[in-house]
């Protein structure tokens, strides 16, 4: 009898560990990163911005210029070298997400960027609703208007913003679990 109870308990533990997050109208959970991806139509912005981006991972760094457009329920980021050569294009909407690469370092994984962009640019109330809807075990804090903190079992992210306008002048994103940083400098922004 004890063996039967132990077997049932083991089965319940296995089934609980296989549980998936709840569906949400605001976001999906990326299976590669384990992070929420905010749907483009929920980001709360309609704009085109030019940016200078530096991504570092340990001693490796990758710098590029980006054109980010959020409009018509879609997000598109086109990354270019300093000479204007296309490096990669990232796009996403409610139904699909895609990454095309042409000239990126072998150790660069663009799959994290779609989740990163949502965490960086979505309004705080949208992020809170996404985390509540999906029942993700991530704590989200906004200790001041220039900082966001995400903490969980497999998540330790800090985002800091500089500038006082409607769109940040500079962003510093740190994913302490995956050990990479993103620094963004806004060069221009046009609201649509």
Image: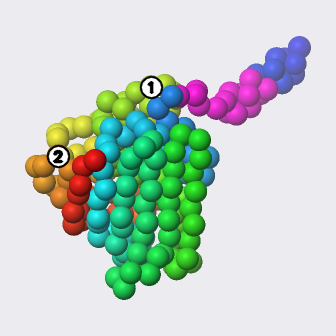
> Within the magenta stretch, is there residue 19?
yes
Which residue is farthest bottom?
A: 83
Q: Which residue is mark 2?
A: 166
As helix, strand or loop, the secondary structure at mark 1 comes to helix
Q: Nearer the viewer, residue 53 or 144?
A: 53
Q: Is residue 74 visible?
A: yes
Q: Is residue 48 left or right of residue 62?
A: left
33 over 77 or under it: above or below: above
Q: Residue at x 51, y 45 (%)?
A: 93
| Disc sitting over residue 97 in the figure | none
Q: Is residue 152 visible?
A: no
**Residue 112 position within the rendered picture, expressed as x and y whole percent measured from the top left:** 50, 57
Res. 6 image quadrant: top right
Q: Residue at x 41, y 75 (%)?
A: 80
Q: Residue at x 59, y 41 (%)?
A: 95
Question: How many labels, in total?
Answer: 2
Q: Residue at x 36, y 32 (%)?
A: 126
Category of crowding for the residue at label 2, using alpha-carbon neighbours closer than 10 angstroms: few (below 14), some (14–19), many (at least 20): few
The range drawn in magenta is 10-24
Res. 190 image quadrant: bottom left
| Disc sitting over residue 132 in the figure | 1
> Within the magenta stretch, is there residue 103?
no
Q: Is residue 180 left or right of residue 93?
A: left
In the rendered structure, are the residues bearing label 2 and label 1 in contact, judged by CB atoms less than 8 Å apart? no
């Amino acid at each position: 009898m004890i063996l039967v109870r132990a077997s049932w308990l083991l089965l319940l533990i296995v089934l609980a560990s296989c549980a998936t997050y709840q569906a949400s109208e605001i976001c999906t959970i990326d299976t590669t990163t384990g992070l929420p991806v905010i749907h483009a139509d929920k980001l709360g912005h309609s704009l085109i911005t030019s940016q200078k981006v530096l991504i570092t991972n340990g001693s490796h760094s990758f710098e590029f210029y980006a054109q980010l457009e959020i409009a018509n329920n879609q997000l598109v980021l086109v990354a270019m070298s300093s000479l204007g050569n296309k490096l990669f294009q990232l796009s996403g909407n409610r139904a699909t997400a895609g990454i095309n690469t042409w000239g990126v370092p072998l150790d660069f994984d663009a799959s994290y960027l779609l989740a990163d962009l949502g965490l960086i640019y979505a309004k705080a109330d949208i992020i809170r609703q996404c985390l509540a809807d999906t029942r993700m075990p991530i704590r989200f804090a906004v200790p001041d208007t220039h900082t966001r903190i995400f903490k969980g079992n497999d998540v330790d992210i800090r985002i800091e913003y500089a500038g006082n306008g409607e769109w940040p002048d500079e962003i510093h994103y740190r994913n302490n679990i995956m050990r990479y940083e993103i620094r963004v400098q806004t060069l221009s922004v046009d609201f649509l």
